[in-house]
Image: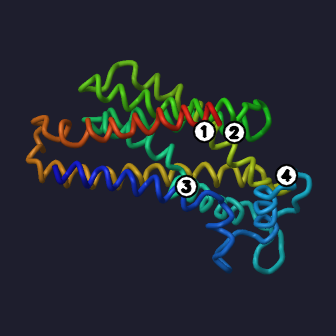
Amino acid sequence: MHGRLRLVAALAAILLASAAFGHPEDEFCTRGEDGLDPALCAALAELNSAEGAVSQAELKPLLDATGKERSFWSTAGLYVTIGIGHILPDGSDHILFVLAIFLASTRLRALVIQISAFTVAHTATLALAASGIITPSPSLVEPLIALTIAFVAIENLVFKEMTRWRPVVVFGFGLIHGLGFAGFFGELGLPTGQFWSALIGFNVGVEIGQLSVIAIAAVLGLMLRRKLHDLEGTGRFRQTVVRPASFLIGITGLWWFISRVIA
């Protein structure tokens, strides 16, 4: 019972943390020398104002502390930080999706296959959407992201082992999540001449954030398995952790889907 209460508290903390960091500039534009370039911060602030969005043409190339244009690697490094922040702590929907994948994976190989499929898929659509080749509507993408969370969580409740079609499903859902990443990436107002360095850095940051979520979940999962004496797969971990967590994730995904559709 105590384990389930801790699980509920942990998921609640994730949701509350995401609410606390709703605007990207709030987190990265108040760090002094380690924060974002002032030009980018100004654009982010304007994006959240009543005046509307800033076009890419209005932004100058990002500058470093000396006033010189940032190099490829400097820009990429900056956007790695932004990508990490988009997942931790801001990406509650992506966090829950990755956790749902993790909970269904009883073997390392299954987890690696799913995460790899998800990574390849969202990288592809992120690049396509960010470069303007495809232009999906956020009003369609955001509800679909919520629905993917609910689907994977419900599948965890129905099937004890990963189904044969799960990697294909995760790949398809990864395409949708990539469109969500692209929406956020586009809102940053990309600096002139630094598109690819920003895109690569952002995607690497997203991957670091996702792998961090999995690493934390793996450590906590191992601790709980030991506490439940379920290192050999007796089923206690599934009953005590996987099913309750998947239920909460599924309910959250359905709630987000409904709220985003009617918003």
Earlier sequence position, callout 4 versus callout 2: 4
Q: Residue furthest top?
A: 165
Q: Position of residue 46 (x, y in %)?
A: 81, 60
Instruction: Name the residue that disc number 2 marks.
Output: 127
Mark 2 and mark 3: Cα distance apart in space: 21 Å
Using the image as rendered, state which of residue 189 and residue 65 is in the foreground.
189
Occupied quadrant, residue 238: top left
Instruction: Name the residue that disc number 3 marks.
Output: 90
Q: Residue 123, which numbered label?
A: 1
Residue for point 17% across, 54% down? 2
Using the image as rendered, state which of residue 46 and residue 106 is in the foreground.
46
Residue for point 27% across, 55% down? 219
Occupied quadrant, residue 83: bottom right
Camera-near label (2 vs 3) is: 3
Camera-near label (3 vs 1) is: 3
Instruction: Name the residue that disc number 4 marks.
Output: 52
Q: Amino acid at mark 3?
A: Asp
Residue 38 to residue 18: above or below: below
Mark 1 and mark 2: Cα distance apart in space: 6 Å
Residue 246 to residue 216: above or below: above
Residue for point 83% across, 51% down? 53
Asked if marks 1 and 2 touch (Cβ < 8 Å), the reply is: yes
Q: Around disc 4, counting alpha carbons within 10 Å, would you say few (fewer than 14), some (14 to 19), or many (20 or more)?
A: few
